[in-house]
Amino acid sequence: MSESRPPATPRVLVGVSGSPGSLTALARAADEAWRRGAELWPVLAWEPPGGDLAARRSPAATVLVGDWQRLAQERLLQALSDAFGGTDTGLPGQALVVRGSPGPALVRTAGRTDDVLVVGAGGRGLLRRALWPSVSRYCLAHAGCPVLAVPPSPLHAALTALHRRNTLGLRLDPGLLEREREAAPPDA
């Protein structure tokens, strides 16, 4: 006699770091999970400072791993609170804290072909691309499930430009926000 297994509930997994881009992706993932009748799985990936290799070499790191894990859990709970006003998303699923580099950890966690992985597309500047590897590009290239890359909010880009001008002591242009908003795609 063969055993029949009930079909797995579809999942929408979303990479969360607490950044404004990841909060935008989290909100989009919640909407996607609701529309699909799927579970929402917010995932925060973390690594020890300096990476796993540095942590293995340092005897003090073994003592600190528990603290780093706890800090990652707190950051995930804070991101959920920022996005939903509390830790309850209103959807079935579970929040996960996974140890590992964000791209590989997200791809590994979203291991079912019926999963949907949602990631923030992050900044698009040349300097940012050169200094930090893109989690969204890694996920798009390696995931075995559909990946939805959510672009950053146009308002966030405009506020970042204003902050940069202010930090550099440049004259603030009051019309900059308005021009940035007008230049943004209509559905953003």
Image (cartoon, rainbow, N blue to C red):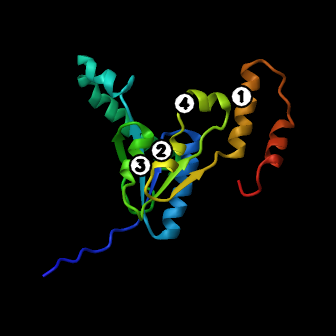
Q: Residue furthest front?
A: 141
Residue for badge 3: 107
Q: In terms of secondary structure, where does tag 1 sit?
A: helix
Identify which amino acid the numbered label 4 is placed on: Trp
* Residue 30 x/y as whole percent: 51, 59
From the image, state whether disc 1 or disc 3 is nearer to you. 3
Identify which amino acid the numbered label 2 is placed on: Val
* Residue 136 x/y as whole percent: 53, 45
- Nearest to N terminus: mark 4 or mark 1: 4
Residue for badge 2: 16
Mark number, residue 163:
1
Side of 157 where 13 appears, left or right: left
Q: Which corner quadrant of the image does residue 175 belong to?
A: top right
In the image, 156 versus 7, the foreground residue is 7
Residue at screen point 58% across, 41% down? 20
Mark number, residue 132:
4
Tell me the CA gap for discs 2 and 1: 24 Å
- Nearest to N terminus: mark 2 or mark 4: 2
Quadrant including the N terminus: bottom left
- Nearest to N terminus: mark 3 or mark 2: 2
From the image, state whether disc 2 or disc 1 is nearer to you. 2
Are the residues tagged 3 and 2 within 8 Å (C-beta)? Answer: no
Residue at screen point 77% across, 48% down? 184
Tell me the CA gap for discs 4 and 1: 21 Å
Identify which amino acid the numbered label 3 is placed on: Val
Q: In terms of secondary structure, where does tag 4 sit?
A: loop
Tell me the CA gap for discs 2 and 4: 17 Å
Q: Residue furthest bottom?
A: 1
From the image, state whether disc 3 or disc 2 is nearer to you. 3
From the image, state whether disc 2 or disc 4 is nearer to you. 4
* Residue 171 x/y as whole percent: 84, 23
